[in-house]
């Protein structure tokens, strides 16, 4: 079945490539389909390649010794994962699972390393993406170690706003929040605390809840209050 490779245009690390170069990438990669709740890759397994989300959504998780899940990130269409193992050759650092039926595009390690050697702009874009993720990780580590429940949950909402939110006139709309138990696993707290805190934010005038979505009414003010 012929697939639409348009999504490659919107992958940040490929943003400076032309149509011919994107066509070459489309030819070396392969598609993999995953059902909701299936595991894409396990922590500690060998890194076979770089994954790009063509359709769907995945979560990146690690598990504590007692089996508790900590969600590090929720990734969406045109996001990449698996880049660390590609670059250093070590095993996977986290488990990735599909949170809805997903179509992933896999570029094998040797093919991707060849791409980096031939396209310096992709190298620069990759470094920018890694730096962005390091900054996000630093912010999250600080929140989890130093802040109260409101601060932790606000940090997760800010992370989601930056990744999937739509900003307009100072407001950020997140059309579809992750499930509350997933937000709890991202914030290191309980589902009950998530529900209570979201309603607290609403009472304070920071957010509006709309079904499965959420709107941050003054994004800059919200960040100033909790970061």
Image (tube, grey):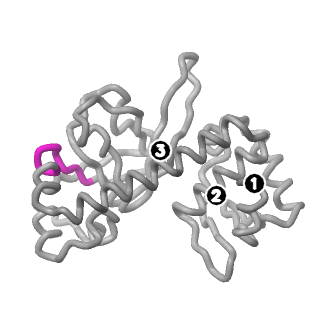
Residue 77 vertical position relative to residue 58 in the rendered view, above or below? below
What residue is drawn where x is 13% and y is 70%?
Answer: 21
Instruction: Name the residue: 16% across, 66% down.
Output: 2
Quadrant location of the N terminus in the rendered image:
bottom left
**Nearer to us in this view, 105 or 216:** 216
Mark 2 and mark 3 in contact (Cβ < 8 Å)?
A: no
Q: CA distance from mark 2 to mark 1?
A: 9 Å
Q: Are marks 3 and 1 in contact (CB under 8 Å)?
A: no
Query: For residue 150: magenta?
Result: no
* Mark 1 element type: helix
Q: Nearer the viewer, mark 3 or mark 2?
A: 2
**Earlier sequence position, callout 2 versus callout 1:** 2
Q: Secondary structure at mark 3?
A: strand
Check whether the beta carbons of the residues at disc 2 and disc 1 lie within 8 A of each other. yes
Q: Which residue is mark 3?
A: 59
In the rendered structure, which segment of residues is drawn in magenta? 105-112
Please tell me whether mark 2 sits on a helix, a strand or a loop.
Answer: helix
Tell whether position 111 is magenta: yes
- Spatial distance from mark 3 to mark 2, Cα to Cα? 17 Å
Residue 158, numbered label: 2
Q: Can you give x and y, in whole percent of width and height, for residue 78 in the image?
A: 36, 62
């Amino acid at each position: 079945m012929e697939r639409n490779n348009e999504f490659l245009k919107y992958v940040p690390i490929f943003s400076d490539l032309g149509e011919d170069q994107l066509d070459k990438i489309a030819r070396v990669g392969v598609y993999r389909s995953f059902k909701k709740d299936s595991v894409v890759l396990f922590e500690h397994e060998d890194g076979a390649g770089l994954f790009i989300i063509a359709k769907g959504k995945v979560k990146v998780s690690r598990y504590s010794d007692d089996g508790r899940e900590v969600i590090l990130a929720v990734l969406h269409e045109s996001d990449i994962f698996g880049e660390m193992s590609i670059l250093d050759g070590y095993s996977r650092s986290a488990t990735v699972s599909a949170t809805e039926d997903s179509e992933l595009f896999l570029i094998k390690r040797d093919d991707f390393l060849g791409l980096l050697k031939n396209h310096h702009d992709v190298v620069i874009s990759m470094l920018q993406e890694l730096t962005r993720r390091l900054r996000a990780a630093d912010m999250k580590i600080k929140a989890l170690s130093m802040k109260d429940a409101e601060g932790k949950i606000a940090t997760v909402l800010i992370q989601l706003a930056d990744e999937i939110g739509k900003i307009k006139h100072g407001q950020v709309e997140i059309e579809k929040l992750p499930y509350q138990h997933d937000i709890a696993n991202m914030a290191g707290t309980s589902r009950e605390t998530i529900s209570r805190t979201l309603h607290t934010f609403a009472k304070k005038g920071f957010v509006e809840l709309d079904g499965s979505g959420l709107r941050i009414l003054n994004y800059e003010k919200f960040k100033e209050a909790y970061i």
